Amino acid sequence: MSRIGKKTIAVPKGVTVTLNGQDVTVKGPKGERSWTVAEEIEVKQEGDELSLTPRLDTARARAMWGLSRTLVSNMVTGVTDGFDKTLELVGVGYRAALKGQALSLQLGFSHEVDIAPPAGITFAVPKQTEIKISGNDKQAVGEIAAVIRKLRPPEPYKGKGVRYQGETVRRKEGKKK
């Protein structure tokens, strides 16, 4: 039995869930998300709750059960509260700025790096050394944050680079004389 899969998903007020066969569509104040649940999983809506159960007792059905429940739960959370990640720029001369909707980064290269936001993602730059990424799709927010971090990952000697907020970088000792 999946401990995650057997939990029900509470649907808050202002959110509508539409079930069309295996397609689950969730609409809320922050947008609309849809996803097709695997054939092995059955989705039921009872009042203000969604429940997912496996149709068969196979290894794939058990594997898809918890995954499907988590993805549908993330869709409900995304259209109500949304998801966001914060990145920090550490290093002399490392700066971020917005050019329209696009993000412009100065990361010690000979050129600026411009990143256009994917559909449904917004960038905000409260400080020159801080980037907030937000959207209603958890996977897309995490992926664009990882793409930005990969441009200049934190290095272990001085700690310079792009890191997630609260991330600790293990520092190495430099050369000895």
Image: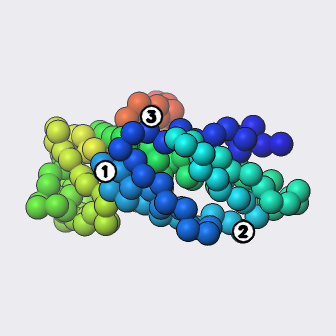
The residue that disc 1 covers is: 30
- The one nearer the camera, 88 or 170, is 88
The residue that disc 2 covers is: 39
Label 2 environment density (alpha carbons within 10 Å; few <14, some 14–19, many ≥20): few
Does dot 3 land on a helix, a strand or a loop?
Answer: loop
Mark 1 or mark 3: name the one nearer the start of the chain.
1
Does dot 2 land on a helix, a strand or a loop?
Answer: loop
The N terminus lies in quadrant: top right
Left or right, 94 with reference to 19: left
Give the distance between the C-alpha atoms of the residues marked 2 and 3, in whole angstroms.
Answer: 39 Å
Residue 129 seen in the current view: yes
Query: Where in the figure is residue 44, as x and y percent of width and height?
Result: 64, 53
From the image, state whether disc 2 or disc 3 is nearer to you: 2
Query: Where in the figure is residue 74, as x and y percent of width and height?
Result: 50, 48
Mark 2 or mark 3: name the one nearer the start of the chain.
2
From the image, state whether disc 1 or disc 3 is nearer to you: 1
Residue found at the very far front of the displayed protein: 47
Corner quadrant of residue 115:
bottom left
Label 3 environment density (alpha carbons within 10 Å; few <14, some 14–19, many ≥20): few
Residue 161 seen in the current view: no
The type of residue carrying mark 3 is Glu
The residue that disc 3 covers is: 167
Q: Tag count in the figure?
A: 3
Mark 1 or mark 2: name the one nearer the start of the chain.
1
The type of residue carrying mark 2 is Glu
Left or right, 38 with reference to 120: right
The type of residue carrying mark 1 is Lys
Question: Residue sitting at 16 percent across and 61 percent down?
Answer: 101
